[in-house]
Image (cartoon, grey):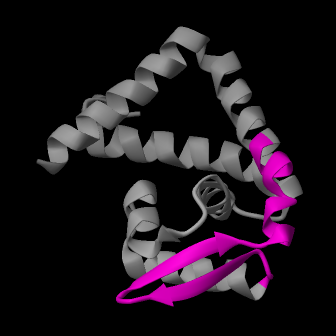
């Protein structure tokens, strides 16, 4: 890899994203969901009645993208939406709740996998530093 690429935050974070996304896809494959769908469902299970805006903010995705994700989960009978004024609230169904443990295990497998490769300390530091750096760059 060219030295200038190793010094480029854009390139290195995209490379990391591709690697971790591949790992996440592999660990979540047994659930039948992509990691994003799994994490969205976990958020809804953890906080039934969350607004779509809150969920989009938590997942750091556009509201329109979240709407598509929720529509897909709703089509599979895993969540329900209800309107309350201008807000749309999202609730897990019993079928959605039944998948919680399987999705949590996929997330745990992913965490264990990258922690085993990077080491617990490095994995924790990297996650915290990426959050801090992203927040700082967004200001």
- Seen in the picture, residue 124 relative to 15 is either above or below; the reply is above
Residue appearing at x 35%, y 33% in the figure: 130
Q: Nearer the viewer, residue 72 or 90?
A: 90
In x, y percent, where is residue 47?
57, 57
Give the number of callouts. Answer: 0
Residue 48 left/right relative to 109: left
Give, as a single range, the part of the protein colored magenta: 76-104
Q: Kindly indicate the quadrant of the structure image that contains residue 62.
A: bottom left
Q: Kindly indicate the quadrant of the structure image that contains residue 98.
A: bottom right
Q: Nearer the viewer, residue 96 or 89?
A: 89
- Seen in the picture, residue 56 relative to 110 is either above or below; the reply is below
Residue 2 left/right relative to 101: left
Residue appearing at x 70%, y 17% in the figure: 116
Q: Say which quadrant the N terminus sits in.
A: top left
Any part of residue 8 in sight = no
Residue appearing at x 46%, y 43% in the figure: 15
């Amino acid at each position: 890899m060219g030295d200038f690429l190793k010094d480029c935050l854009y390139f290195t974070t995209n490379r990391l994203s591709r690697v971790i996304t591949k790992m996440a896809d592999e660990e979540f494959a047994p659930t039948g969901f992509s990691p994003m769908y799994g994490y969205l469902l976990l958020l809804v299970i953890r906080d039934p009645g969350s607004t779509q805006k809150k969920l989009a903010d938590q997942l750091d995705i556009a509201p329109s993208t979240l709407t598509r994700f929720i529509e897909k989960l709703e089509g599979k009978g895993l969540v329900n939406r209800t309107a309350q004024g201008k807000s749309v609230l999202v609730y897990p169904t019993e079928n959605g709740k039944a998948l919680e443990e399987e999705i949590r295990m996929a997330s745990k497998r992913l965490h264990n996998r990258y922690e085993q490769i990077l080491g617990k300390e490095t994995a924790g530091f990297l996650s915290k530093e990426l959050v801090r750096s992203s927040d700082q760059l967004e200001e």
